[in-house]
Image (cartoon, rainbow, N blue to C red):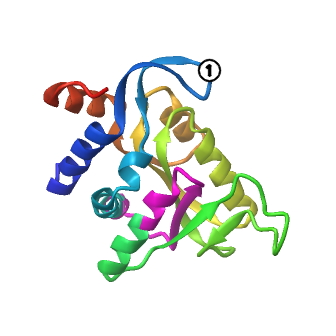
Amino acid sequence: MSSAHSRLLNLLAERSFRLGDFVLASGARSDYYIDCRTSTMHAHGQVLMGEVGLAAIRDAGLRPDAVGGLTMGADPLAYAIAAASWRAGDPIHAFSVRKQAKRHGKGQLIEGCFEPGARVVVVEDVITTGGSAFQAVEAVNRARGEVLGVLGLVDREEGGRATLEGAGLRTMVLYTASDLRAAVAADGPAS
């Protein structure tokens, strides 16, 4: 594990992973909650995510034109990877997929650096069911882009990754909920 990968794991465990009794968006109950935004919008988190996310994409042998996903969870991850790629001298641009097309202007569903024919990696902060990633993949496909794969910051290990892979989408994850739980246990519980 690289130093940046390890530091990002610790940041996520400290800032984003909470033990307790939570009701998730799906209505299911969980003994933990992951709010990646407290890490993905953190200045140090941005630098680490960019480095680790870019390395994962390159290690997978992917050469996308752009990275992006469903706003707002995917946005900081996409922007961090784009910035890191620029610093590395091999730019990958970023885009955001709206939850609904704008009702004014050009009425776009995808914003930013995306155009038909673009080869992209869809990014997601937390993969649970895979629904947000699928929504972004569908938008890219409708806009005539090519999805090379999906990159998740954290996999909750609740079947989303398998569902994405079952649909033929190459899916990479940087961390699992088990990784975060183990990091919290090593440093003491967060609440």
In the rendering, at what x and y percent does residue 109 appear? 73, 62
Q: Which residue is mark 1?
A: 27
Q: Which residue is most to the right?
A: 103
Left or right: 101 in relation to 37: right
| Numbered marks: total | 1
The image quadrant that residue 105 belongs to is: bottom right
The image quadrant that residue 71 belongs to is: bottom right
Magenta highlight on residue 127: no
Locate the C terminus and report the quarter of the image it occupies.
Answer: top left
Give me the residue at 76% from left, 68% from top: 108
Give me the residue at 54% from left, 47% from top: 169
SS class, disc 1: loop
Left or right: 99 in relation to 46: right
Vertical arrangement, residue 24 with respect to residue 108, above or below: above
Residue 120 seen in the current view = yes
In the rendered structure, which amino acid carries the disc numbered 1?
Gly
Q: Which residues are magenta?
A: 57-79
Q: Which residue is most to the bottom?
A: 89
In the rendering, at what x and y percent does residue 163 appear? 56, 34
Magenta highlight on residue 77: yes
Residue 62 seen in the current view = no
Vertical arrangement, residue 9 with respect to residue 147, above or below: above
Vertical arrangement, residue 8 with respect to residue 127, above or below: below
The image quadrant that residue 28 belongs to is: top right
Give me the residue at 31% from left, 56% from top: 45
In the rendering, at what x and y percent does residue 184 appear? 23, 30
Q: Residues within 10 Å of mark 1 (few under 14, many from 20)?
A: few
Foreground residue among 143 and 52: 52
